[in-house]
Amino acid sequence: MTEKMTISRLASAAGVNVETVRFYQRSGLIDEPARPYSGYRTYAGEDVRRIRFIKRAQHLGFTLDEIASLLKLDGSQTCASTRDLAAKKLAMVEAKLSDLLAMKTALATLVSRCDSEHPSAGCPIIQALIDD
């Protein structure tokens, strides 16, 4: 027999708060169980695994819409589709890394200019941002 748990125990077991569980329910990522006569909805271990899946996917940069697509792809016949989604996400991450590296280089140059130039002529960083 599988252990049934309240929403607060589910949230605790999944490492999220109750409002996150409710948000996932409103978003359609997890099902909201029917309210029994006793008044307390109960959840199973599968719900914990599903929430953990969602959180891990979010940490990898997947949006909630992309996660919903991944959840629908569950099964052995869907590996190619899942791989395609992950490859697209990887390409986006690589593009962001490239942009961040360019930003880092530009900022390092500006800071270096600020350290090497006399401030009496005005701030070199402000001047670089004003100039074309």
Image (cartoon, rainbow, N blue to C red):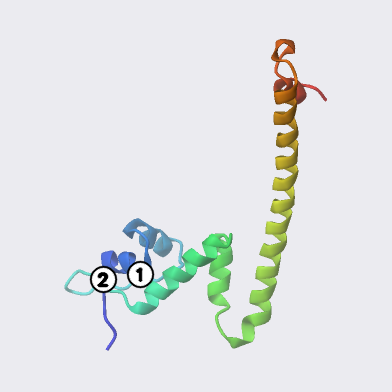
What residue lies at 39% left-to-right and 58% top-to-bottom?
Answer: 20
What residue lies at 74% left-to-right and 23% top-to-bottom?
Answer: 116
Residue 4 vs 88, above or below: the answer is below
Q: Which mark is residue 102?
A: none
Quarter of image, res 70: bottom right
Of the 4 image quadrants, the one containing the C terminus is: top right
In the visual, does 37 lie left or right of 10?
Answer: left
Residue 8, given in percent of the width and then of the height, sits at 27, 64
Q: Of the two numbered discs 2 and 1 on the same chain, state the one appearing first in sequence.
A: 1
In the visual, does 91 lie left or right of 82?
Answer: right
Residue 1 vs 102, above or below: the answer is below
Residue 88 vs 45, above or below: the answer is above
Q: Which mark is residue 32?
A: 1
Residue 126, given in percent of the width and then of the height, sits at 70, 21
Badge 1: residue crowd in 10 Å (few <14, some 14–19, many ≥20): some
In the visual, does 116 lie left or right of 1?
Answer: right
Q: Circle 1 — which element?
A: loop
Of the 4 image quadrants, the one containing the N terminus is: bottom left
What residue lies at 33% left-to-right and 64% top-to-bottom?
Answer: 11
Residue 117, given in percent of the width and then of the height, sits at 75, 19
Question: Of all residues shown, which one is farthest toward the top?
Answer: 120
In the visual, does 78 lie left or right of 68?
Answer: right
Residue closest to the eye, 108 or 97: 108
Q: Circle 2 — which element?
A: loop
Q: Which amino acid, mark 1?
A: Glu
Q: Are marks 2 and 1 in contact (CB under 8 Å)?
A: yes
Q: Which residue is mark 2?
A: 41
Give the distance between the C-alpha atoms of the residues marked 2 and 1, in whole angstroms: 8 Å
Q: Which amino acid, mark 2?
A: Arg
Quarter of image, res 25: bottom left
